[in-house]
Image (tube, grey):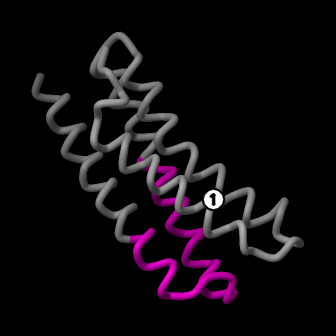
Amino acid sequence: MHRFEELKIWQKAMNITENCYRTTKNFPVEEKYGLTSQLRRSAVSIPSNIAEGAGRNTNGEFMQFLGIANGSSYELLTQLYLSKRLNLITEEKVRPIISEILEVTKMNYSLQQSLKQS
């Protein structure tokens, strides 16, 4: 088992989630059950799956949850790109979040590689 609170990848994923919540607060009310909800659930899924995997008994199980977290990262990227295309978010606001997500996906891949080797 790993202490997920100490993992840099979990900490960065939590930052992404906070940023998504803050950003979607300004989305139109009609998106409350649509894109706002989807963005938030995808964002929450990333650190949640990292934490759940860290609490599992084997590295194989941890890697499985890291894979799910990575899928949620790409889901979130797609939703952010769509939000930009629909003019719900500006380039200025979306670019830093996208950069953070891409960094987390790279960290995720590296962590999975290190778990394979141990």
Name the chief secondary structure element in magenta: helix
Residue placed furthest toward the top: 57
* Quadrant of the image containing the N terminus: top left
**Residue 73: horizontal and vertical position, in percent?**
46, 55
Residue placed furthest toward the right: 30
Q: Is residue 40 left or right of residue 45?
A: right
**Residue 21: horizontal and vertical position, in percent?**
63, 59
* Quadrant of the image containing the C terminus: top left
Q: Residue at x 80, y 64 (%)?
A: 34
Q: Is residue 104 left or right of residue 27?
A: left
Relative to the observer, which residue lies in front, 113 or 91?
91
**Residue 47: horizontal and vertical position, in percent?**
47, 40
Task: Report the magenta residues as a range.
Answer: 70-98
Magenta highlight on residue 84: yes
Please give the residue where the numbered disc 1 appears in the rendered image: 21
Magenta highlight on residue 74: yes
**Residue 89: horizontal and vertical position, in percent?**
62, 82
Relative to the observer, which residue lies in front, 43 or 115?
43
Q: Is residue 72 left or right of residue 33?
A: left
Q: Residue at x 44, y 53 (%)?
A: 15
Classify 85 as above or below 36.
below
Secondary structure of the residue carrying numbered label 1: helix
Classify 100 as above or below 109.
below
Q: In which quarter of the view is residue 98 placed?
A: bottom left
Classify 24 as above or below 65.
below
Q: Residue at x 69, y 86 (%)?
A: 86
Amino acid on which disc 1 is placed: Tyr
Residue placed furthest toward the left: 117
Q: What is the crowding at mark 1: few (fewer than 14 residues within 10 Å), some, or many (at least 20)?
A: some
